[in-house]
Amino acid sequence: MITQIKGLHHVTSMAAHAQQNSDFFTKNLGLRRVKKTVNFDDPQVYHLYYGDEFGTPGSVMTYFPFPHIAPGRPGTGEVGDTYFAVPRGALKFWKDRLVAQEVSGLDESEVFGEKRLRFDGPDRDSFSLIEVDNDSRSGWQSGDIATSEAIQGFRGASLRLQDSAATSELLRFMGYQQVDSQGNHSRFAISGGNGADIIDIETLQQADRARPGAGSVHHIAFAVEDRAAQLEVRKALLDTGYQVTPVIDRDYFWAIYFRTPGGVLFEVATNEPGFDRDEDIKHLGESLKLPSRYEPHRAQIQQQLEPITD
């Protein structure tokens, strides 16, 4: 069994409009934009990162805003809800705030004993705010959002699958243990994780496969401390029969990728070197940062990118 994974590192989704995306996460949700860069495989598309003050692994929601992308169609073989943790008692503040902002899809519920508020993102992305006790993480204090209400990071995420058996086995191999079940939902958790350490599986045997598009999660990344731990995880996955990519330098972390039995793309990312490797902490996410191979083409790339105003 793999023991190096400590929870989520980041979740990466797709969007239709860069400005709308940036406004929603920084103004509506009060997260900090910690990096403004480009898709390493398509430099005409931004890669935007939002999180806490430092972009701590386990807090970072990231987006590829593809101009003219069609909306996604929810279904199986994808990440369903992305869960954010908020302090106990904060849901009333968030409900009032999101109602005032005319955010759609609001729904209050209690699942696995946790109070949650579900809502839609700008591309009908599916999110939930979950009240969590004894979370030592501090949210980014932004504008009219106090630290007593701020999003502290991820709580976890859910996977929508037609058949959960093989992915459940994979999660156990990755260090997760099943801790609860409720109807067609099963909950897995890592003991002693980074706070972003919950994965729920929703089994939908009769549902159609998802169609990726705006609002869909592209991949979900799990955190390991460093490159040595990542290499151990990669070897364990390869030895078990998974097809895993070589280690890829993403400037702010190193990454490996593999496809799960249920069709979801998993990544394992390092906590090092972090988002301050090329920007001072006080100015994270302000300037367009490019991978070194694209720096000679900066002027052309900037002309093709939609301007983002803060």
Image (cartoon, grey):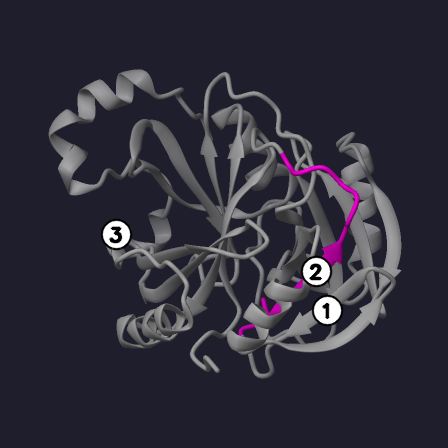
Disc 2: which residue: 201
Q: Which amino acid lies under the numbered mark 2 shown in the image of this protein?
A: Ile
Q: Nearer the viewer, residue 256 or 59?
A: 256
**Side (left or right) of 152 relative to 46:** right
**Side (left or right) of 6 relative to 186:** left
Q: Residue at x 69, y 56 (%)?
A: 163
Range of the magenta residues? 194-210
Vertical placement of residue 4 versus 20, above or below: below
- Give the SS element for disc 2: strand
Q: Based on the displayed image, in which of its 4 quarters is residue 71 positioned?
A: top right
- Indicate whether residue 14 is drawn in magenta: no
Task: Give the distance between the C-alpha atoms of the residues marked 1 and 2, in whole angstroms.
Answer: 6 Å
- Give the SS element for disc 1: strand
Considering the whole magenta stretch, tell me its main secondary structure. loop
- Nearer the N terminus, badge 3 or badge 2? 2
Q: Count neighbours of disc 2 (C-alpha within 10 A) and say few if under 14, some if 14 to 19, many if 20 or more.
A: many
Vertical placement of residue 101 versus 55, above or below: above
Disc 3: which residue: 251
**Discs 3/1, front:** 1
Q: Which amino acid lies under the numbered mark 1 shown in the image of this protein?
A: Arg
Q: Residue at x 60, y 63 (%)?
A: 167
Disc 1: which residue: 187
Q: Position of residue 179 (x, y in %)?
A: 73, 78
**Side (left or right) of 308 relative to 302:** right
- Give the SS element for disc 3: loop
